């Protein structure tokens, strides 16, 4: 029970890594605020938490909207009294196109959800955590934000920004009992990537091959890392960017 008596909040908790994180938080003893743009997906996650004997609150919010994020935090605190552990996970991919072909509306929407959304969430989470005496935030970034990604300029730029924002928030709050870290997942078996595999023949095998482990990750493998970083067991970790990637960043070949 890593998160016994804590209150967790996860954005984008209606699917994939966010849903797995919500279920993992509940299994680890937390009460969970399940946030998603798609209300019915969030309600499905809450149903799974309920079936497992956990407690949750569903909130529909668009993380790119300041009024939605403000309302999300007010309702979470009104219901559970505090928010200890957060995973800012919601993102919008921005499509696949070479940089000159990216349409401005895709650039804008990707940056609004994936980068501005993380800033807005922390803008309202940090003051609440200061008021209650501490907390822990884990932002979901991506390796694309570290090494770039062909045909994903807006997404890579936004995720690079998420890493910079994470380190900035960690620096500002290190002496105020608020820890802020990020996770770079590798290829994780979620609806978003499965949809891509269904459309592009051979993509699943090629994606598995870039991991030293030669397989994709499961959403629960990222969720476990989020729960650990949110827990008191990670009490001396802040400003870290943890790759949960089956070894994408190491060379699996010998000379
Ligand atoms: N799956 C992967 O291989 C992978 C790899 C690297 C990084 N990531 C990152 O992990 C996170 C989760 O990815 P996933 O694959 O589970 O995605 P997913 O598409 O399965 O789920 C994303 C969830 O976010 C919600 N959402 C989207 N826009 C929102 C908004 N504006 N406000 C609130 N909710 C919103 C969606 O409704 C959905 O439920 C994302 O930040 C993604 O960039 C995923």
Image (cartoon, grey):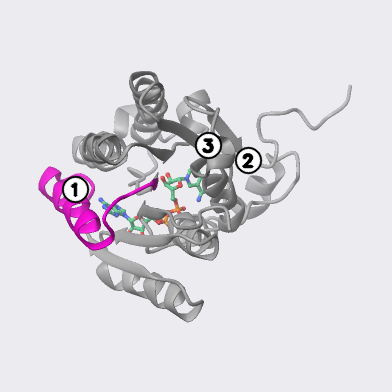
Q: What whole-number distance in Å separates the C-alpha atoms at marks 3 and 2? A: 7 Å
Instruction: Please tell me in which quadrant of the rendered image residue 96 appears.
Output: top left
Find the residue positioned furthest to the bottom: 51
Would you say the residues marked 2 and 1 are in contact, meaning their CB atoms lie under 8 Å apart?
no
Instruction: Please tell me in which quadrant of the rendered image residue 80 appears.
Output: bottom left
Q: Is residue 196 visible?
A: yes
Q: Within 8 Å of ligand 1, the CB of disc 3?
A: yes
Q: Residues within 10 Å of mark 1 (few under 14, many from 20)?
A: many
Q: Earlier in the sequence, mark 3 or mark 1?
A: 1
What residue would you read off at disc 3?
Answer: 184
Q: Earlier in the sequence, mark 3 or mark 2?
A: 3
Q: Is residue 150 visible?
A: no
- Horizontal side of residue 228 vs 175, given as left or right: right
Would you say the residues marked 3 and 2 are in contact, meaning their CB atoms lie under 8 Å apart?
yes
Q: What whole-number distance in Å separates the C-alpha atoms at marks 2 and 1? A: 30 Å
Q: Earlier in the sequence, mark 2 or mark 1?
A: 1
Name the quarter where the N terminus is drawn. Answer: bottom right
What residue would you read off at disc 2?
Answer: 245
Question: In the rendered structure, does residue 78 fall within the stretch colored magenta?
Answer: yes
Point 42% across, 27% down: residue:
163
Closer to the eye: label 2 or 1: 1
State the extent of the magenta-drawn residues as a range: 63-85
Q: Position of residue 94 (x, y in %)?
A: 32, 43
What residue would you read off at disc 1?
Answer: 69
Q: What whole-number distance in Å separates the C-alpha atoms at marks 3 and 1? A: 23 Å
Q: Position of residue 39 (x, y in %)?
A: 26, 68
């Amino acid at each position: 029970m890593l998160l016994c008596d804590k209150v967790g909040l996860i954005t984008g908790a209606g699917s994939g890594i966010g849903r797995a994180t919500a279920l993992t938080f509940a299994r680890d003893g937390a009460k969970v605020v399940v946030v998603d743009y798609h209300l019915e997906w969030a309600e499905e996650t809450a149903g799974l938490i309920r079936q497992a004997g956990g407690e949750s609150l569903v909130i529909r919010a668009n993380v790119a909207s300041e009024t939605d994020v403000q309302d999300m935090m007010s309702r979470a605190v009104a219901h559970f009294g505090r928010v200890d552990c957060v995973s800012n996970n919601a993102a919008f991919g921005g499509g696949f196109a070479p940089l000159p072909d990216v349409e401005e509306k895709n650039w804008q929407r990707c940056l609004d959800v994936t980068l501005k959304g993380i800033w807005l969430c922390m803008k309202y989470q940090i003051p609440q955590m200061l008021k209650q005496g501490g907390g822990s935030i884990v932002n979901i970034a991506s390796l694309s934000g570290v090494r770039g990604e062909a045909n994903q300029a807006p997404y890579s730029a936004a995720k690079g920004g998420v890493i910079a924002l994470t380190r900035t928030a960690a620096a500002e709050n290190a002496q105020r009992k608020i820890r802020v870290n990020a996770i770079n997942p590798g290829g994780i078996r979620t609806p978003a990537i499965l949809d891509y595999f269904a459309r592009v023949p051979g993509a699943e095998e090629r994606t598995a091959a870039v991991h030293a482990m030669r397989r994709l990750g499961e959403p629960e493998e990222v969720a476990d890392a989020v729960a650990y970083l949110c827990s008191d067991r990670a009490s001396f970790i802040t400003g870290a960017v943890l790759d949960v990637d089956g070894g994408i960043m190491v060379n699996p070949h010998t000379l």
